[in-house]
Image (cartoon, helix red, strand yellow):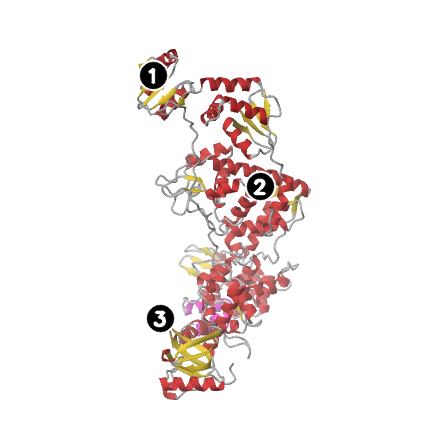
Amino acid sequence: MGTGPLTGRRDREATVPEASTAGGSGGSGAPRSLAEALRARDDAALAALLRARPDLLNPVPGDVTQLATRAGTRASVVRALERMDRFALQTAEALAVAPDPCPYEVLESLLTGEEGTTGEDNGARAALPRALGTLRDQALVWGGEDRLRLVRTARELLAPSAQRPSPTGLGPTVAEATAGMSPTRIQEIVAAVGLPATHDPVSAVTALTGLFTDPERMSALLDEAPAEAHQVLGRLVWGPPYGEVTPNPTVPVRWLRDRGLLLPASARTVVLPREVALHLRGGLAHRDTAPVPPPVPAHREHRPQLVDANAAGQALAALSTVEELVKSWEHAGPPVLRAGGLSVRDLKRAAVTLDTAEPQAAFWIELAYAAGLLASDGEADERYAPTPAFDDWCELPPAERWSALAAAWLPATRTAGLAGEQDAKGRTLSVLGPDLDRSAAPEVRRRVLELLAALPEGASPDPDALLDRLAWERPVRSASDLRARLAHWTLTEAEVLGITGRGALSAFGRALLEHRDPAPLLAPLLPEPVDHVLLQADLTAVAPGPLRRPLGDTLAVLADVESKGGATVYRFTPGSVRRALDAGHAAADLHAFLTEHSRTPVPQPLAYLIDDVARRHGHLRVGAASSYVRCDDDAMLGEILADKRSAGLGLRRLAPTVLAAQAEPTALLDGLRAMGYAPAAESRTGDVLVARADAHRTPARQAPVPVPDGPPVPDDTLLGAAVRAIRAGDLAATAVRKEPAPSTVVPGELPRTSAAETLATVQAAALTGSAVWIGYVNADGAASQRVIAPVRVEGGFVTGYDHTADEVRTYALHRITGVAELAEDHL
């Protein structure tokens, strides 16, 4: 709340102009400004306005006048218009081209057309009160039914101009189009249409406007027009209203221009006046009005049980995919780009690992990141790696793990579908990069699911009908096409995540949307983890369901995944067996493991494969010389030396059983394995080293916080406090005060009083229980005005109930700059 002079100036600059253009109050009780209209609302209506437009609360307005001023700022009005549905926006657009102020009947005719010209009513007349009520609630329209006023900023945004065409396709009025025209030219037009001659240009323009708005006289004038002139008007009537003309226009264009049916906008451009276009349109502001939202009918219907089963299968596959992705990054995760994000090469590698397309891989990576399962490790050589939360997530039951993923997806602003595109500066957007947040994404996701939930159980919609509905609900944002793309991505992501099945919302997806725990509904649909596999003679193992964690982890080391689905197929290869031996498993341990967990006998080829690899595993020993190779079989060492592929390793024989190498031990191990051998690393004491790498984890990291789409919606407590503060500030700004002595009166300001006068006034108010208006300067030097009811005055302080803060406070008397009594009947 500001000081007295500031409040008075704000009223004059922001509020009075709105009222002054109204041409009067329109009745003894009609508001003359937006501030008066808001002041007349009850507390519930003010709270509803602040809830719908939370940007008005930052900071809390000092009074109603300040609230009205802020509600008319360009940024706030644009934000409010973006949240209008199509018909409410069409209503605002009609008001922008209507007379100001506009009677309700005129607005209705702009949306429904002149009687007898539009045929069957499409529901606009019945829907108009709802649309107008929405605009009133949002403080975009005020005034009585006979004097409707669109907020000036909204009119400037929606009204037509030479630089910005109107959404209605209408051009300027006759008065606006002739503003720069010479009086002689105006007289020529008036004479051409048969109006009485006048030397006053204003009267001539008024007469011309009256002709164009008179249906009978306009029809008679157009009956005289050449047939080609009607074709010219037909091309301009629904917009754009501007057209180019040559220096020597055709006869039809010249006929229209001479009679003012086309007015010059520039040297080579003419414009169709708004009054003429409205006559040709039958009084309609829009070609097509959309008073009711388009329906989203059921396109296909499935049994709910089938939908849930299909969605549960997708949910199980999603868990497997995310776990496989994150585990593939726990030993040597991809590096973080200098500008942030994942390189295209690493995205392709992740897609190969997951056996999916790159856009799908981008979605899974962003989902794991949104759920807090992976992040950058923050090291000097920064890489992506699992977080400690991933280990906790793995220990949860499958249904709860899925709930965590779905709960992270629904409010996330990360938009994986944008990866690979370019931003406004031509930079490529990368997965996990800093520029993938889109604040509209959570709203679109939730709205898409709400539309699915409105269908019968098991029914899936037509995607085109769903997009049409979303475009009706937010037509301004839909113009950028981002909202439609977000809806497409939502349908795809919800299907692969398991929220929907066969395009229909699942039962546990519905629970997620309704803020209920979906895990109890999903858990019975998921298969129980199994503790066995089926070994086959072709060196494969079939897992008939999800494996229990110890079995799955060991088998993932011993074999490679060949195919996924309801049953996962693993393949045993020499490389996979060697990987298990490198991890510290002995051949006997592998035989015992397979025997214990296989429901079928261990095939002889698999047993031979394990024994053969184990027999050769560790036969060669590699150490640091830079490195060396040690083997009891000197013939094998000779074979290695004679192999041309070993030339790059820099080998030479030190002894019958030892070769020295210039390559590092790791490079030597890789080189010998590439030649078909199975060497093992050894320690300084000659023991075989276990080559299993420790799983890397980042420090504790929080999941990324979604980027808010504007200010957060305030809760009831904040709204109540804000409304009380606005009312109290308004009370101080508009309080009726007793007239002070003429010498102390300064218009619009609180009179300054001496210390003795201040003390006497507050003491008298404390005795009589009345309220006073004070000006106060706090310890920081901030000045404010307050209405207080003094209770006690002592020790240089006054204690009383502060109507502005809605609480009892104490003020230092020496900081009170002025005091005035309030009229007895004001409070």
Cα distance, mark 1 to mark 2? 53 Å
Q: Which of the 4 quarters of the picture holds residue 377? A: top left
Residues in magenta, as a range: 183-207
Q: Is residue 169 above or below residue 611?
A: below
Q: Which of the 4 quarters of the picture holds residue 625? A: top left
Q: Is residue 653 left or right of residue 533?
A: left
The picture places residue 400, in percent across and down from the top left corner, at 57, 44
Residue drawn 55% across the image and 17% down it: 605
Report the front residue among 431 and 317: 317
> In this figure, which residue is indicated by the disc labeled 3?
780
Report the front residue among 624 and 735: 624
Q: Main secondary structure of the magenta part?
A: helix
Of mark 1 and mark 2, the one earlier in the sequence is 2
Residue drawn 41% across the image and 38% down it: 343
Cα distance, mark 3 to mark 2? 57 Å
Kindly report which numbered mark, 3 or 2, lies closer to the viewer in this rendering: 2
